[in-house]
Image: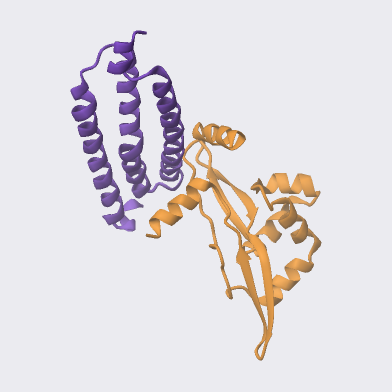
Amino acid sequence: MSIHAAANWLSQHEPIWAITIRGNIGVTGEADPDEIFALLDDQYAQAILKQTRNNAMSAKEISETCEISISTVYRRTERLIECGLLAEQRVAQSDGNHYSLYEAQLDELTVCLTDDGFDVTVSGKATGDLADRFTEMWEGL
Amino acid sequence: MSVSQVADTQPVSDYLLLLSVSLIALGLALFIVFHAYRGYQRNNSVRMLYLACGLGFITVVPMTISIGVNTLGQMIEVAPHVYTFYLPLVARVSEISGICTLLYSLLITPDESN
């Protein structure tokens, strides 16, 4: 807890965080199965998901650790977010600009063969900060 | 410490046990209140602000007052009436205001919080 708490205290000194987490826990059926298969087959998308599994990273950090060009990172993250495999957090900076942090949303993928073809279900994990999930829970009441 | 003193005031060992348990409870309460407050800061959610205040009034404030009065009682003579009447009264009033704040947090519509 202590490291987490220390990180929390540090974040207190930054400007107010404006967070947008796209896609909630257990998003299903919205994404195109073919697109998900294509992404999971893609080595860059795989690398991004692996790197961001337990920690939110900026596009620059992903680009450096995975040795992928920054434009590829942006293209892949956009597609991953659309499929609900990746979550984006927008972090406001004091100069008014903002940058994005990416964190893998994917926990488990279920593929069912039905009469209509493949039915893909993405089981997301609870991403984001404890405070954000707390807010989500309380506002959902 | 004479026998009469032990009979009159709380024994030190009891006080220390009570203090440590209270501090654990206070720490946990502060952790939750802190995260509710951070939820307000990060998401600009007024409801979370009221939640943090309400939880604070219900848990943190009575605990702090109780610890404070008990500590004071160890140092100076405090009338027994304080323990049996004023302390519970203040704690209950704080809890009532906390519960009202929580209710208010639940009742305001999410649209107002944006």
Q: Position of residue A99 (x, y in %)?
A: 59, 46
Is residue A83 something that shows in the picture?
no
Q: Position of residue A122 (x, y in %)?
A: 63, 69
Provide the letter of the chain coloured purple: B
The image shows residue B84, relative to residue B92, as above or below, that is: above
Chain A is shown in which shade?
orange
Picture quadrant where residue A120 is located = bottom right
The image shows residue A91, relative to residue A9, as above or below, that is: below
Instruction: State how the image is colored.
Output: by chain
**Going by the image, does A97 lie left or right of A33?**
left
Task: Give the residue displayed 70% in from the left and 60% down from the top.
Answer: A76
Residue positioned most to the top: B2
The image shows residue B11, relative to residue A125, as above or below, that is: above
Task: Give the residue displayed 72% in from the left and 48% down from the top.
Answer: A62
Q: How many marks?
A: 0
Picture quadrant where residue B97 is located = top left
**Going by the image, does A63 lie left or right of B13?**
right
Q: Nearer the viewer, residue B49 or B57?
A: B57
Is residue A26 something that shows in the picture?
yes
Task: Give the residue displayed 41% in from the left and 44% down from the top.
Answer: B40
Residue positioned most to the bottom: A115
